[in-house]
Image: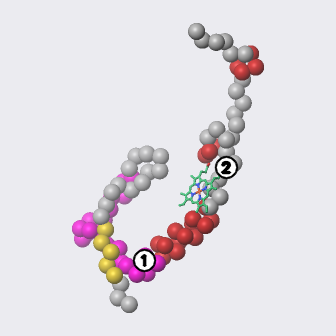
Amino acid sequence: MAQELPATMGHLEWQSSYISAAGRRQCLGESLAKMELFLFSTCLIQKFQLMPAVPGQPPSRVPEQGLACPPKHFHIRFLERPR
Ligand code: HEM
């Protein structure tokens, strides 16, 4: 049998921590992660030329549907740059 809520619970106060996007919580490693990503991708691009697996057919620019909208799966070729 369902219990009646106490009158004081009829009003729910919104707390910013319920949903992270609405609150003050934030990734503490954001700056570090950004620097790492920059170094990683820079090294990669310095050493390799990234080409579509099928020449003339670049990856689709239409994202997958979802929370983060990632790109659709694709294949690429890494061509080592001459030193
Ligand atoms: C690409 C790398 C990273 C991504 C995408 C990422 C993403 C996230 C996300 C989405 C959250 C949740 C934030 C929220 O509650 O609203 C989070 C929290 C957190 N991240 Fe990261 N993060 C990354 C790297 C790092 C690194 C390198 C560190 C530490 C060295 C780190 C430490 C933390 C900590 C401690 C929290 C919890 C913050 C809290 O509870 O208030 N993250 N991260």
- Tag 1: amino acid: Ile
Q: Which residue is mark 1?
A: 45
Calculate the distance from the C-alpha at mark 2 to the C-alpha at mark 1.
33 Å
Q: Earlier in the sequence, mark 2 or mark 1?
A: 2
Q: Position of residue 44 (x, y in %)?
A: 43, 76
Which region shows up in magenta?
43-63
Residue with the most extreme bottom position: 83
Residue that badge 2 annotates:
25
Label 2 element class: loop
**Which quadrant of the figure shows ligand 1?**
bottom right
**What is the secondary structure assignment of the residue under circle 1?**
helix
**Which label lies toward us, 2 or 1?**
2
Q: Identify the residue at image location x=66%, y=12%.
A: 4
Density class for disc 1 (Cα within 10 Å; few <14, some 14-19, many ≥20) is few
Magenta run includes residue 57 = yes
The answer to whether mark 2 is within 8 Å of ligand 1 is: yes
Q: Residue at x 40, y 46 (%)?
A: 65
